[in-house]
Image: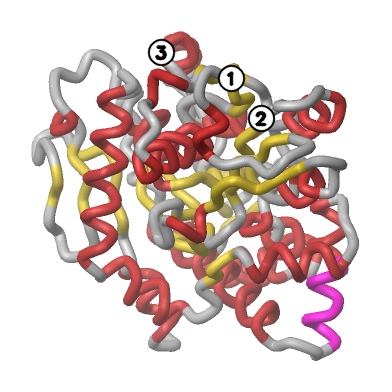
Amino acid sequence: MKGSMRLGMVVAAFAAVTLLTPVAQAAGHQTCTIAWSHYTGWEPIDYMKSSGILKKWGDKYGVDFDITPPMDYVESMNQYTAKQFCAVAVTNMDALTIPAASGVDSTFVVIGDYSDGNDGILIKSGKPASLKDLVGKQAALVENTVSHYLLLRALEMSGVPQDQVKTVNTSDADIGNVFATGGDQTIVVTWNPILMTARNVKGAQLLFDSSKIPGEIIDGLVVHTDTPDNVKKALVGAWYETAQVMAESGTPANREAIRVMAQSAGGSEGEFLAQLKTTHMFYRPADAVAFAGNSQLKATMNSVRKFAFDLKLLGDAESPDHIGIQFPDGEVSGNQKNVKLRFDTSFIKMAADGKL
């Protein structure tokens, strides 16, 4: 989640490590480390490793996988952009405005979910409040990320001028504390599990959440586009086997998976299950393929790239068309000669067809 200053830092970091290769060879195997941060839809990554599912698929395709400890979200994307990791858990918007805008060609190989209430705007108030109460105030959020996008979409839908609400860039690691310790009229925009915890603070009111814009905040895993196919296949296979475990409610494997993910998220199993209810998970790979093939994805990404351009998140771009975005059917929005973000469901379809 970033801005022009951060983009400059990304470019500098990228320039300093251009000799690094995110997928390396080790004893005849390729190695791939996945960078990730805490979010309900990404907690499966921790279970994917601890359960042995990631190793199983890595062994099948000759890949030595590892995952980072949970990272600050911005830092995970910065380091992925600097080619220190071969994959990162990221949203559709942030994949465009950080790696793609920095010239790093990236591909969504896993479409895991879309936020259906996992992102929200909170105000602390002793009386009933609405989005109109944001006028003249400031909101703490990770600027230029999906939180920023959610805020501006909420203002747009409620008729509140965007320039009437100021934002304060705040790390996702600090937002919960900012809200808990802040006074009356403290406003934050954040995501689960932070959002759920903050909603328990006295006086907390949810003004808007991502269920009002279904399908617009998409979460998944991106890899560098030149990553070998065997790595992509192993990653997709491991993810959707994990998703299947999550879908089999009540089984021993499912109960263990929920326990591990809840512990990773820092909450109870009940809290994690509640968060899953506001996460539209694609447990079946066929559902992810259908979602990515729907015309809504193109409309969403057109909205996202306009937002990114308006906030000057596409570097020196002269229009939203500066960066090309390729969809599963091969169609490109934007510059066909500068495609830097791709949605590739070919490997997900292989999973759906039982061909991985």
Mark 1 / mark 3, whichever is N-terminal: 3
For the residues marked 1 and 2, what is the alpha-carbon distance in whole angstroms? Answer: 7 Å
Q: Which mark is residue 138?
A: 1
Question: Can residue 84 be seen in this snapshot?
Answer: no
Circle 3 crowding by C-alpha within 10 Å: few under 14, some 14–19, many from 20: some
Residue assigned mark 2: 187
Give x and y (percent) for residue 68: 71, 41
Check disc 1: other Cα within 10 Å, few if <14, some if 14-19, many if 20+: some
Most foreground residue, 139 or 352? 139
How many other residues sit within 10 Å of disc 2, few (<14), some (14-19) or many (≥20)? many
Q: Which residues are magenta?
A: 252-259
For the residues labelled 1 and 2, say whether their Cβ atoms are less than 8 Å apart.
yes
Residue placed at 36% from the left, 27% from the top? 161
Amino acid on which disc 2 is placed: Ile
Sequence-first tag of 1 and 2: 1
Residue for point 11% across, 36% down: 335
- Say what secondary structure mark 3 lies in: helix
Residue 81 is situated, as x and y percent measured from the top left of the image, at 46, 29
Please give the residue where the numbered disc 3 appears in the rendered image. Answer: 4
Residue 231, above or below 288: above
Question: What's the image's color scheme?
Answer: secondary structure
Mark 2 secondary-structure assignment: strand
Q: Relative to the observer, which residue lies in front, 239 or 303? A: 303
Left/right placement of residue 322 relative to residue 141 reads left
